[in-house]
Image (spheres, helix red, strand yellow):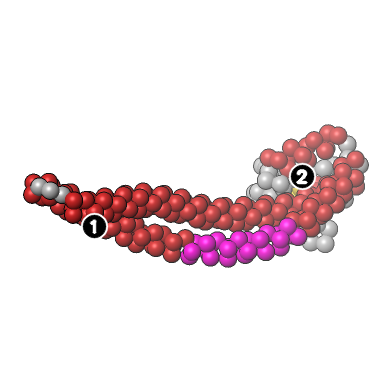
Amino acid sequence: MPEKLQLLRDLQDIDLKKLEVDQQRQKGQNEKETLHSEVARLQDMVDSLANDISALEAEKKELKMAFSQEQQNIERSESRLPQIKTQKEYVAVLKEIDTAKKLSKELDTQISAKDEALAGLNNDKAEKDAELEDLSSQAKARCAEIDERLAVFEAQLAEMKSQRETLLKELPTSLRKRYDLLLSRRGGLAVVEARSGACLGCNMHLPPQLFNSLLVAEDIQACPHCSRLLFVDDKA
Ligand SMILES: [Zn+2]
């Protein structure tokens, strides 16, 4: 086999491994992103519940202020009763008291409704808080595992990059460009085996004289169908 072809085969081996490690690395990064977005989604839910709770608390506070205002009105009106001289005025004040009591009762009902709604929201929030805490710690542990693997992948990729550069230096520029072009256009597979008269890159039959010439050739041959560079495994 021509020496250049051996170099190309070595290069292809490295590039296939590189592709695999790249995919693994991408998978790890994707998993991390998914975990982060799940945590962020839950955090958003917790934040939104906290907002709803403070809005309800503000509404409840206003209702309570209105309620105590009415209570004061009632007390003030009731304290005036003993000093009242006329029947007409007495009836008017009693009517004031009655109106204020009705309003108080209405406000009290509204406050109870807010309390009920708040209790529900606080429950929901406590549940989501616990979920968030669980998910955060799980995500943190998993991300630490992934980061360890990513560091290994980075080291492997750096090693492959330097091996690749060493091999590339030994190839003539034209062949290097041809290889890189095939690699990018043919899904990372530029150098393939020819076996039983077929190209294993595209599975098409090769012209018999081309296949035969591969067995003895000194030149590098390409598949006429997919343009990939061909080699014959000596052991096969
Ligand atoms: Zn082919």
Amino acid identity at mark 2: Leu
Q: Which residue is the extreme one toward the top?
A: 174
Amino acid identity at mark 1: Lys
Viewer-proximal residue among 173 and 78: 78
**Left/right of residue 82 with respect to residue 127 in the rendered view:** left
The segment highlighted magenta reads 126-149
Write the residue at 56% across / 52% down: 40
First in residue order: circle 1 vs circle 2: 1
Write the residue at 67% across / 64% down: 141
* Residue holding disc 2: 229
Q: Which mark is residue 105?
A: 1
Residue 190 located within the stretch drawn in magenta: no
Residue 206 is at least partly visible in this image: no
Q: Is mark 1 within 8 Å of ligand 1?
A: no
* Closer to the eye: label 1 or 2: 1
Q: Residues within 10 Å of mark 1 (few under 14, many from 20)?
A: some
Residue 140 located within the stretch drawn in magenta: yes
- The picture places residue 181, in percent across and down from the top left corner, at 74, 37
